[in-house]
């Protein structure tokens, strides 16, 4: 068996037909990673187009209120409003290098879809985005943005009608069109080499954050990030993996521990093979994929990236969860105390901190604010019974 | 080698049993049994819809596998997805079914990853796949006493239409047969008995899935169609 595992997790559990495309991507990725021209081009787009480096902001008001020092890595300030643009620019450059003309991508909350459509517009690539029907309805503004950018949005009216089904639709499309199409996978999951590719392009987050703290002479005590597929978390964790800093990933606790009401893969899931890799998955008793829930359209995914599974087992990262109500509380808490409206995904990481504020007293916490929350206003409005105020 | 794919327990237990018995008695060489998975990334709408139907009805698959074991007359293969076997436990699955089934076809298990299950104690032959991109020389390292190689006749999900005169396919099948010494069965894209006959000119056999599953809800139509497949290729 080829390498492509993090410990026992990862692999390439896909149709044989896709193996040449995965091998081609692997070859091109490892070549590009060590190619100064490619890296310079990527950095140029990151800096001049996407808006890097993003600042680390000391959230003074919340720090004072809760008695800890909260630092926010402001990925929400990037072009298109989330860290997703790092990966889509990187993979779009790889697609060009491989001579692909067409890009497909899945999206849950819509941020990866918008970032993919943006990269495709920039590089003149044909673009089709798959999105579950439920997600397309709750993230309507992002659907409109994708269409404005020239992408075709295909709504998937199957299964749970969310991110899981969008990924499946992409895999089916890719099998049929693998010769001229690149699947621009949006998180650090799926078959090898995608988890490595996405982590690599997102590692810029951790690198910049590390530089900020090193220049101020002290590393944070904790680095915390939400974990859906896990790309923003891996991105920031990568900068601190070789330190003593405690790393915490926060999953979607949903409504309760009842099956179907959460997306807590690590403590409520089990090892399984899902959408291309071996990792932790929430399953039913007969090996079928279980339904999951989160108020965030980006976190209600039954699987998780294989590197996170490895980090969980090796105990380098601790995985906790945050319920919907605590995430909504955090959404408002950041908006009203700091004037920043966070994505509901990031609100889970924030909610976990607020809920456990006594534990974090006087500690220095770095939180990856992976996206902004204007896309989530309709969800929050609905959650609160029709009013945002 | 002529074969069909049937979804287990579809459209209901009794109809499936009746059609399974018929299929074993009508001259086919093998029957491939689909075990459903609710994230079937290789299946088109007909097969994934049938699988969803079985899962929704919560049909007891183990009971049906017992029925298959008790009534086995031809070669039986299971077609499913990695997680179904992994969740059952590779060794447990193998111990329980190795006397019932002659091989497994795992839609999301590429050849390089056969060892993932073998290392976990899986002893049932895993049928290797070949595609037009397959390196026929390299394929030999995945041959381990299986009965045949499964040639994926098109890029796409089940139920798509294959170009049966595709010279690239025909050339590749010939190359795979020569280099492996194995029989090559053509799967994906066969819709009619005439298609099956056409395939038999360059492959060692065929398997028809979607068109069979489409007919599972109508036993008489199913029997007529499956019989015509069993008789295909013999009048040339």
Image (tube, helix red, strand yellow):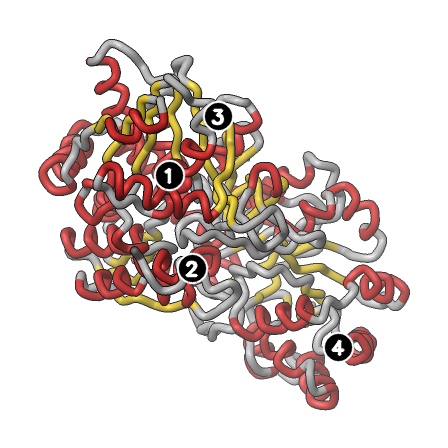
Q: Are marks 1 and 3 on the same chain?
A: yes
Element at badge 2?
Answer: helix
The chain identifier of the residue carrying mark 4 reads: B
Mark 2, mark 3: which one is toward the viewer? Answer: 3
* Quadrant assignment for the N terminus of chain B: bottom right
Q: Which mark is residue A231?
A: 1
Q: According to the image, label 4 marks what residue?
A: B12
Q: According to the image, label 3 marks what residue?
A: A317
In-front residue for pair A97/A110: A110
- List x then y, in percent, for residue B202: 55, 68
Mark 2 surroundings: few (<14), some (14-19) or many (≥20) residues within 10 A: many
The chain identifier of the residue carrying mark 2 reads: A
The residue drawn where x is 41% and y is 33% is A354
Query: Looking at the image, is mark 2 or mark 1 earlier in the sequence?
Result: 2
Does B90 sit above or below residue B228?
A: above
- List x then y, in percent, for residue A32: 25, 34
Task: Say if residue B104 shows up in the picture.
Answer: yes
- List x then y, in percent, for residue B231: 70, 82
The residues tagged by marks 2 and 1 sit, at their Cα atoms, a distance apart of 17 Å
The chain identifier of the residue carrying mark 1 reads: A
Tell me the quarter of the picture where residue B37 sits.
bottom right
Residue situated furthest right in the rendering:
B70
- List x then y, in percent, for residue A372: 26, 46
Element at badge 1?
Answer: helix
Is B179 placed left or right of A333 in the picture?
Answer: right
């Amino acid at each position: 068996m080829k390498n492509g595992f993090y410990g026992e997790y990862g692999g390439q559990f896909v149709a044989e037909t896709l193996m040449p495309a995965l091998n081609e991507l692997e070859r091109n990725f490892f070549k590009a990673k060590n190619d100064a021209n490619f890296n310079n081009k990527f950095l140029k787009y990151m800096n001049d187009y996407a808006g890097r480096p993003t600042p680390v902001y000391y959230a003074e008001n919340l720090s004072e209120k809760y008695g800890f020092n909260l630092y926010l890595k402001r990925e929400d300030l990037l072009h298109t409003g989330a860290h997703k643009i790092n990966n889509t620019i990187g993979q779009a450059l790889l697609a060009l290098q491989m001579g692909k003309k067409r890009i497909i991508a899945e999206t849950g909350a819509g941020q990866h879809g918008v970032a993919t459509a943006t990269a495709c517009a920039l590089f003149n690539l044909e673009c089709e985005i798959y999105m579950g029907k439920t997600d397309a309805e709750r993230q309507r503004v992002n659907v409109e943005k994708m269409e404005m950018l020239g992408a075709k949005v295909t709504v998937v009216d199957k299964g749970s009608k969310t991110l899981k089904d969008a990924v499946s639709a992409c895999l089916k499309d890719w099998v049929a069109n693998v010769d001229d199409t690149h699947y621009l996978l949006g998180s650090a999951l799926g078959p090898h080499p995608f988890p490595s590719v996405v982590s690599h392009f997102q590692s810029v987050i951790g690198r910049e954050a590390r530089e900020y703290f090193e220049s101020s002479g002290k590393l944070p005590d904790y680095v915390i990030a939400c974990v859906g597929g896990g790309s923003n978390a891996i991105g920031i964790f990568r900068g601190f993996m070789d330190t003593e800093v405690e790393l915490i990933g926060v999953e979607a606790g949903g409504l309760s521990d009842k099956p179907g009401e959460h997306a807590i893969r690590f403590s409520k899931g089990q090892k399984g093979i899902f959408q291309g890799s071996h990792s932790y998955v929430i399953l039913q008793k007969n090996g079928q994929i279980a339904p999951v829930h989160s108020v965030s359209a980006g976190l209600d995914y039954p699987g998780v990236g294989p590197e996170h599974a490895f980090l969980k087992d090796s105990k380098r990262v601790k995985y906790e969860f945050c319920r919907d109500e605590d995430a909504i509380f955090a959404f408002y808490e950041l908006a009203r105390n700091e004037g920043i409206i966070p994505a509901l995904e990031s609100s889970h990481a924030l909610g976990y901190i607020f809920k456990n504020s006594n534990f974090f007293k006087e500690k220095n916490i770095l939180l990856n604010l992976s996206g902004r929350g204007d896309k989530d206003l309709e969800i929050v409005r609905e959650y609160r019974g029709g009013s945002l105020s | 080698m002529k074969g069909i794919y049937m979804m287990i327990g579809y459209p209901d237990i009794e109809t499936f049993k009746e059609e399974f018995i018929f299929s074993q008695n009508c001259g086919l060489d093998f029957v491939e049994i689909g075990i459903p998975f609710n994230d079937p990334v290789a299946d088109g709408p007909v097969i994934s819809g049938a699988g969803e139907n079985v899962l929704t009805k919560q049909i007891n698959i183990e009971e049906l596998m017992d029925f298959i074991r008790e009534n086995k007359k031809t070669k039986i293969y299971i077609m499913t997805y990695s997680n179904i076997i992994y969740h059952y436990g590779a060794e447990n699955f193998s111990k329980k079914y190795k006397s019932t089934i002659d091989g497994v076809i795992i839609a999301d298990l590429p050849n390089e990853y056969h060892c993932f299950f073998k290392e976990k104690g899986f002893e049932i032959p895993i049928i290797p796949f070949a595609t037009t991109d397959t390196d026929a020389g390299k394929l030999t390292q995945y041959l381990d006493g299986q009965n045949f190689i499964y040639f994926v006749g098109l890029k796409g999900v089940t139920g798509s239409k294959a170009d049966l005169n595709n010279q690239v396919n025909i050339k590749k099948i010939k190359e795979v047969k020569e280099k492996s010494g194995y029989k090559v069965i053509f799967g994906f894209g066969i819709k009619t008995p005439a298609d099956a006959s056409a395939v038999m000119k360059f492959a060692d056999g065929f398997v028809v899935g979607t068109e069979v599953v489409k007919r599972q809800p109508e036993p008489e139509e199913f029997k007529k169609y499956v019989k015509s497949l069993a008789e295909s290729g013999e009048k040339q």
